[in-house]
Image (cartoon, rainbow, N blue to C red):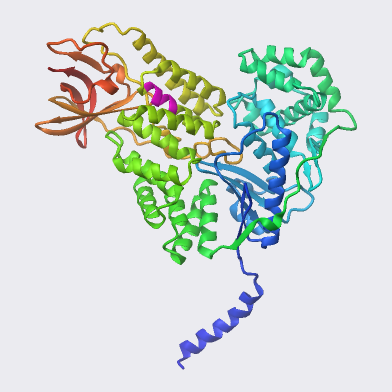
Amino acid sequence: MSLRHILSALLLFAILPALAREKPNVWVRVRSPHFTVISNADAKQARHVAGQLERMRNVFHQALAGKPADPALPIIVLAARDEKTFRTLVPAAWLVKGQLERVGMFIRAPEKNYVLLRVDAEGENPFATIYHEYTHTLMHRTDAAVPLWLDEGTADFYAHSKISPSEAELGLPSADYVLLLRRTALLPLATLFAVDYSSPYYNEETKGSIFYAESWALTHLLMVRGFGQHPSPIQNFLTLLASNVEPMEAARRAFGDLTKLQKDLGNYVQQADFHFVRLKAATIVDENTFSAEVLAPAEALAVQGDFMVVNSRFDDARAVLRVALHDDPQNAGAATAMGYLELRENHLEEARRWFSEAVQLDARSTYALYYYATMLMESSKGGRPPDEVEKSLRTAIQIDPTFAPASSALATFYAQRGENLEEAERLGARAVELEPSIVAFRLNLAFVLLRMERPDDAIHVLESALKIAKTPAETEQVNTQLESARRFQEALANRRAPPPQNLGVSPPALRRRSEEISPPVLRRRSGESPPEQAEGTPAAPEKPPPPRGPRDMLDGTITEVTCSRPAHMDLTLTSRAGTFHLHTEDYSKVEYSALGFEPAGELVPCTGLRGRPARVFFYDLKGRPNEGELISVELRK
């Protein structure tokens, strides 16, 4: 034996005892009726976590009014056995020195809900954060517009609960909130009621603390005061809001004299004892009936890597996913997660490649099929989405009819192509029904309705979207499409033959923004609520458009028109000189005319230009042959 082999053997013998002493990092998966728990603790502990979450679901469905429906998207729980594992998965901001110690989090991704918690936490309820966010999930399953103070207050009311196999204690007092409220001046109720997602009281730490604490206290007071009343004061308040009663007036009618309520709230937080609700709930769960299996190492790494992508730990995710793919190149979950990582980092070509590979590896992965289809739609920007998009999305829907993103994406596909619009409306409405809290699904449905020339219905959908918009970006997006829809509504109301140079406006479709990949069905973060913020990490800024070249003109046939939100239009002109792709950021600024004839009725550019001979004027774009910025369209016979 050579010296090199002897040294290698000695080194191996030196390493083996250390490896033997280290506990293998084995991950198990436990499935219960409503949750999937993936843990590196043992199967017994994983089953206990699943059982506790099933008890939570039973209690909250019994306690919350209206028997809320289960979330359509799956809930996947990562149960870390210890602090070391937990810290490898939490947001990077949580690892900064001086941060509060947390033991759980809830995060929404476009196609799933993730829970992360520690199973070894002592002295704290590791499920408190989960109870809080699960309450949000159930409350957002309806179209009801819940004010932010009541939304957060209700979630905190249920977060401070103890659930055992025999009973549940709901609304236990929060010692931290009570201490803060006793030391800090309360916000006037008018200020509390006016806080929204853009308010400093929601976004700034020093102001946010008092907002959360006072929201909890007021909700706790109203819950306890109204216990046993049918309907309760809070239910009356929400009913008045749904009837478009102004919030302060609705509060006055439902809660009584607000000056007195402010005084009562001040006294309430100073009292020595707080009441809570004891509920004899159906909390008996047989944890032994839950299935359990040991995950292959590559599969466990794929799940952790996917969670890291959702959690914006991109470098760590890439390292973990590379190991998973090295160990198992056929792992479709790791390929899908890698595609999502590239999408989040705005590497679209790489994302398309990974999603294509994921579909080849697992033709029944709804996530891979969905992302593959939406990437095909993205790659056809400015043209007609290919037929393969429809096939991929229909397969995803067939595999899982409750997978809302696929339904919304297929609705948008049909709307972009201007076909099967009644089916598109059904699909878009189904997505909203499955996930009513996702604004982008409502925007997609409104786009379909506008393509059907039903602006009244589209405006109604957009107004409902405005009520549930959670960020300034979402609010701006909805308002932009509302403005376009109202312009279209006005144009349709004046369906007299317009002069040739004013041929109407087209319905809006899908906006490309810095914080999302268009169309909205291909959201980087839609529906995803990472910790500390609602929208997540902004995308890389868009590249500036290329500089204009000289003014140009072509005669030919308009072979394709695609409109996108808020007022973008892409037009393809086939001429003797070749095929040209022309774009405008605002179709209403393009001059439309007709030479030698008057079009019958009103011509809507997004739906009425395709197939027509035309002379088109445009600016060339430097460095982009056969592309231009649209100026005017003159139709010919």
Could you say which is closer to the camera, residue 235 or residue 501?
Answer: 235
Residue at x 64%, y 12% (from the top left corner): 245
Locate residue 450, reporting x and y percent. Answer: 38, 21
Could you say which is closer to the camera, residue 395 or residue 446?
Answer: 395
Locate residue 390, reporting x and y percent. Answer: 35, 40
> Looking at the picture, does residue 233 appear above or below residue 376?
above
Span shown in magenta: 445-450
Could you say which is closer to the camera, residue 69 or residue 520?
Answer: 69
Locate residue 437, reporting x and y percent. Answer: 55, 31
The kind of secondary structure the magenta stretch mainly shows is helix
Q: Residue 184 magenta-drawn?
A: no
Quarter of the image holding residue 262? top right
Position of the C terminus, as image quadrant, is top left
- Can residue 82 be seen by looking at this rendering? no
Residue at x 55%, y 39% (from the top left corner): 72
Residue at x 31%, y 29% (from the top left corner): 419
Name of the residue lying farthest toward the bottom: 1
